[in-house]
Amino acid sequence: MKLTFLGAAREVTGSMLRIETAISAILIDCGSFQGPRAETRRRNTILPAAATSVDAVVLTHAHLDHAGNLPVLVRSGYPGPIYATAATRDLCAYMLRDAARIEAADADYLNRRHADDPAWTPIVPRYGEDDVAATLERFVCLPYGRATPIAAAVKATLIEAGHILGSAQVVLDLEERGRRARVVVSGDLGRKGLPILRDPAVPPRPIDVLVMESTYGNRRHAPVDEMADVLARVITETCARGGKLVVPAFALGRTQELLYALHQLRRDRRIPAIPIFVDSPLAIDVTSVFRLHPDSFDAATRRILDDGADLFGFEGVRVTRSREESIAINAVEGPALIIAGAGMAEGGRVLHHLRNLVEDARNTVLVVGFMAQHTLGRRLVERRPQVKIWGVERELRAQVVALNGFSAHADADDLLAYAISCAARRVFLVHGEPEAQAALGRVLGERGIAAEAPGRGDVVEV
């Protein structure tokens, strides 16, 4: 058996893993890379042949760094099925279409801006909405816990990952010449005790190969029960300064978790009654998918639903779909909280709000998720004196507060416990930056677990 690490190897974005036996080849995820613009265009436009020449694709979840290049895969000639949970398929219907629209709009803007530059190479979007529709036709929905043949001598079982709605770990049972092996791909793992979703499941043993994420392999999150306290303090302090809060938030997962927390704080009168804007048509659509899948919610969340409460819509929340409604937020006087995409501040409506707010010390940029290297979000977290927004350097005078407690990723302690529970014969770390992987590798080694961190393009025989 061979494992080819095509993406998210010693980096966090662009997840892609090929698993190959003598008779079958499976691709786990086909995600978009996010990073320096030139490299992003190059890596996302042309996929390696090892990705397109497979018998089946299994998708762990709908975040674009795992699913964003599926239309490129189909457009490149991949003819087979894409296996995922029903919730992941429903989310991809919105996520991929939105990605196509944003890329088309960005390409049009940049091509017009540089039309008079003879050295400019026009940008062509990777895919359009027709490609997204063709991709969605390939989806085959699998329930959690049911072993399903997906290729010759390969069965796949999806189990809870607890990361976002519909997210799954992939358990592959392979057979070749009378020999059997079990490979577990963690996908992105959630944290225990987070609201809304069920906790990650423990994969069935024995496990021969474990491919696990390592995003926060060198960090520990604040306790889950402290998140609301810190959020309430930051909002209250910003309002006391007369400022606004802008939150770059992933439309999928983070926006819903934040609305859930704000709902509880508003109900308990722990934050001022300021307007809360959800300035993301995608987040609005994604939230509608959450309402379709209460079967994925944990027991505490279902009890709230049984009482008739709306988890994501409450007094003071205003959703804005149109461009005009988004622009009108700038005219709102006094404190307000603005949740807008994209999550790493690399595009979308959040850029408009950051442009208007970052140079005022009364305001707060509230970071509630992981920010990859080379993104505007990472530069904000690092509190650079100046940040470039749409090509213009702006002074960063606003307060920047990072609430890692809102992370939907397992932290170092969670990852250690997960690896121990799996007791795999061989462990590979993916979806993590080198520093995080090195730190996690050392801790695992102290527990007798030898973990490897392959680079992009590495092929490992097992």
Image: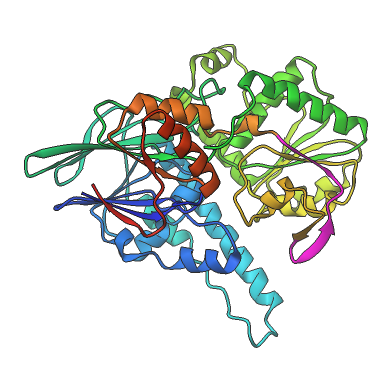
Residue in the foreground of this view, choosing between 301 and 210: 210
User: Along the horizontal axis of the image, is 451 left or right of 227?
Assistant: left
Q: Quadrant of residue 244?
A: top right
Up the image or down, 252 lies above or below 12; here it is above
Residue at (88%, 47%) from the top-left corner?
Answer: 331
User: Along the horizontal axis of the image, is 380 left or right of 139?
Assistant: right
Across and down, in percent, residue 4 comes to: 31, 54
Across and down, in percent, residue 69 comes to: 44, 57
Residue at (80%, 55%) from the top-left corner?
Answer: 355
**Furthest residue in direction bottom, as rendered:** 118
Q: Is residue 364 magenta?
A: no
Residue at (38%, 40%) from the top-left corner?
Answer: 451
Q: What's drawn in magenta, residue-wise?
A: 389-402
Across and down, in percent, residue 224 comes to: 62, 22
Residue 341 in sight here: yes
Residue in the foreground of this view, choosing between 45 and 452: 452
Up the image or down, 414 lies above or below 89; here it is above
Q: Is residue 396 magenta?
A: yes
**Furthest residue in direction left, as rendered:** 178
User: Along the horizontal axis of the image, is 338 left or right of 161?
Assistant: right
Q: Quadrant of residue 420?
A: top left
User: Along the horizontal axis of the image, is 346 left or right of 361?
Assistant: left
Across and down, in percent, residue 109 comes to: 67, 69
Q: Most prominent secondary structure in the magenta stretch?
A: strand
Residue 433 in sight here: no
Callout count = 0
